[in-house]
Image (cartoon, coloured by chain):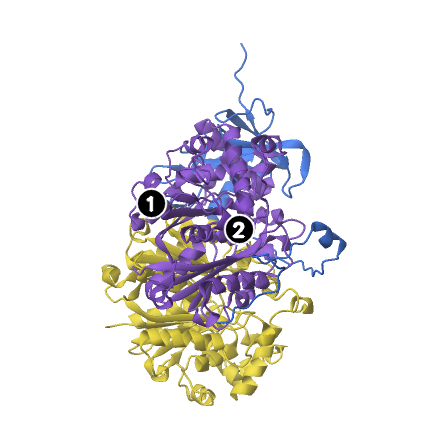
Amino acid sequence: MKAHKSPRPKGVAFAGEALSQGQIDRGTALQTRFRPQAKYSWAAGQAMSRFLDELKAGRLIARKCYRCERTLFPPRMFCEECYRPTDEWVYIKDTGTIETFSISYIDKDAKRITEPIFVGVVSVDGASPLMGMMHYFGETTKEEIRIGMKVKAVWKPAEERTGSVLDIRYWKPIREARR
Amino acid sequence: MRKVACIGAGMTLFRRRLKETPKELCWEATRMALDAAKLEMKDIDAVVTGSAPDAFDGVHMKGEYYADGCGGFRKPITRVFTGGGTGVFSPIAAWWHVASGLADIALVVNEEKMSSCYPHAQSVFAHIWDPILDRPLNPNLVWIFAMEMNRYMTVHKIKKEDIARVAVKNKRNAVAHPAAQLADAKITVEDVLNSEVLAWPVQRLDISPPSDGASALILASEDAVKRLKVETPVWFSGVGWCIDSTMWTDRDLYFPRYLAQASQMAYKQAKIDNPRKQIDFAEPYDPFDYKELHHMEGLLLCGKGEAAKLTREGVTERDGDLPTCPSGGLLGVGNPIAATMGTKVGELYWQLSGQAGKRQIPKEIHTGVTNAWGDLMQFSSVVVMRA
Amino acid sequence: MRVAIVGIGLTPFRPSTPEFSWKELMYDAATRAYADADLDPRRDVQSFVTCAEDYWEGFGIFDEFVPDQLGAAMRPTCTVCGDGIQGLAQGAMQIQSGLFDVVAVESHSKASDLLTYPHIVQHALDPILNKPLRGHPNYLGGLEMDAYLRASGNTARDCAAVVAKNRTGALKNPIAAYGAKLTAEEAERSPPQFDPLRTLDQAALADAGVVLVLASERKARQFSANPVWLRGFGWGTDSPNLEARDWTTAKYTEIAAAAAYRMAGITKPEKAFQVAEVEDRFSYKELQHLEAAGLSKKGETAKRLKKGDFAVGGGLAVNPSGGSLGCGYILDASGLHRVAEVALQLRGEAGSRQVHRARNGVAVSWRGLPTATGGVAVLGVGK
């Protein structure tokens, strides 16, 4: 059978013609552009609607599964382990432990930022072990922040809360009171 | 269970930005694989394709759009998508086409064109997060890796130097890969440690950047291998995959238990009960340097927290006792997500059939394992191959 | 080795489901299927397949968001970017490869969460050749309808009769969203939107979830006293290039049907089935699919339709569920819905729309615009 060869430079076993950012920016590489209209409005559903309402009220809420006896946070209407509906709403605390964190010098578009963002996962007291949420950390430094640090949520004032995870500004270290 | 072998492979260059369209990338990789297997498209019974987010290429249902580039014209073609796990998962889907008896010869083509997304493929990653729990915090993809890396390093007290060794090893290994985007013969641990901190503890040289590329494999049944008189078939001896809960903030990220489960599924089929001894080399998924270590442990090639030591001791060098990412991996060759099949399952094929050229592992090899990893630190696919 | 459907879960179809998140909708469909098969997914289901596309859902990697609500956490799970029959085929092959005995296949539509549906369909077009033409993508349906009618000899009036049959038939389907007592005359008077495609020729979107549980032959009877055998399945793709495509014949259906019939040992499809569910997302597609699947000969379809041959009680009941026109169009899940409705008929569980003595059925699917991709599944009960 005759092998079909695509036109590629001699001695180059693999196909592909690289382009530079400059060629794209200067328009010397022919390009076509399109911006899709992709808009969504997701129904929050049972679990998340209550979760958001409670955030607006300045509280964190979880769901309990009686079978495995876990207190699930973020709350969900079904237990993924037992595969059954969860049973009860349970308020949990707004204190917790840093399970992991990062100190970010880039924003969501990968642009450099001057003030680093402290972000990570906080497991919340009152929920089952390791049940947590991603959030910002504040009032701390890169020298001080560590896995295992005890933190407390700093809430926005009631009139600024909208029913969002951002109703919490950040979680700050719980410092022992000085005697 | 019908035996299935890989009988040919192809890939394009991996580059930050390629001129070719998704269809053309598929065509190039497919043609190369067909030529290697001495087949034509009429010999292919079914096609599988894998590609990661449609938003990169900028086409909804992109599998439909580039189907003709894969030879999917008037054939059964199916696209599978398990996030970053697709590079090793789509070959598994092709495997079951043959193992089930539906196809005698199947083609799998993976493609990624991250450069189409303007201004930067990063922006697509805003949409992999939960809209209520995560997105309002304006997260960057690098945060996921940074959080997982920090947890892993802290729990096992691993030094950044040892993690940086993986980037150095793979980028140096990639010098021997003709398709490599990021090969660097001279890179040192200092270079990695001095590179810009993006989201601590992740630094620029810890990461594989976005790429364009495509790769293809041809799979055949035992009957077809005999009929075609294939000289160097490389057999699939075990496949596995597993997904963990969506609730990633409820999981301990220090160990990828879903990978361990997928590995056990594959090892059971391959009759492997002592992976460290029975596996000759590995191509774990390495989008970040720490991920190679994380995945070596998830692949049960060493105990938890021990992968760094193996690396430090040179065990994972190409001439070591457990060569790991001899291809140069994602860190060295590039990361066009699903198309990394070429440096994962593709590399297993090329190594085990003795066709790896300058990358060929010097010791005798018979069994290799590879994994890919994807979704929200959540999914892994595993393939064990033998020759 | 044979594969059977042992569990069927269908949520009601509704124009919107604001009280449920997509996760909760999927949980509903899965719970119904597992209850139907009387199984515990954590113990009995070994693999999970979902059929989904990121842009229908609004996520970068939708696969992330599927396991928990299906019972799939820490289980082999994957997403197929294809329609329900393509997903079903993957599940069946996983079983036939010897890997698993029980696989769940899921698909859903939460179209009500998607605010810009026509734009997303448009986003599937070729970026260089077709996107610049802009316009509502359903013009492609109008073009195909025009080409098909001229080539087949069927008329726009015949298509209106399909609309009437399916919308009215849906009144007998408790889960349908768009049952309505419509006559062919009323459907014919519907204003043209993409001439000759009229408003009523196009199925309206709906939200719904579908889950089917597949089992290997050796396990099937553990879960179902009357398993519905998946005797054959196939799928195929014609050219993605609009310019190179056959506009008159559903070539993908011909390819899929040939494979499915060969697997099922069917040589005379026109006589083999009592019930058929064929995708009618646009009214003319029902006729086109019937012909491409060999269920009706070209030139005879209109006659048979007029005679009532395709109604419940006729020689071949076509879309007794009401089809997508009557139930609502649920995107890629519509293929799985077609299969589910055939399966319900073969089990004798189709209530007031039951086709008498239905023993063998066929489902024909299409992924919708702008694809030329679809599947065929042949189902049967008894030996």
Q: In which image quadrant can residue B106 be found?
A: bottom left
**Label 2 amino acid?**
Ile
Q: CA distance from mark 2 to mark 1?
A: 24 Å
From the image, which quarter does the N terminus of chain B lie in? bottom left
Q: Is residue A111 visible?
A: yes
Dot 2 and dot 1 within a common chain: yes
The dot on residue B264 is: 1
In the image, B272 versus C111, the foreground residue is B272
Residue at image point 51% right, 63% down: B30
Q: Residues within 10 Å of mark 2 (few under 14, many from 20)?
A: many
- Which hue is chain B drawn in? purple
N-terminal-most mark, 2 or 1: 1
The yellow chain is C
Position of residue C290 in the picture relative to residue C226 (left or right): right
Residue at image point 34% right, 69% down: C343
x, y (%) of residue B166?
A: 51, 36
Contact? badges 2 and 1 (CB < 8 Å): no
The dot on residue B337 is: 2
x, y (%) of residue B170?
A: 52, 41
Position of residue C295 in the picture relative to residue A53 (left or right): left
x, y (%) of residue B179?
A: 56, 51
Q: Residues within 10 Å of mark 1 (few under 14, many from 20)?
A: many
The blue chain is A
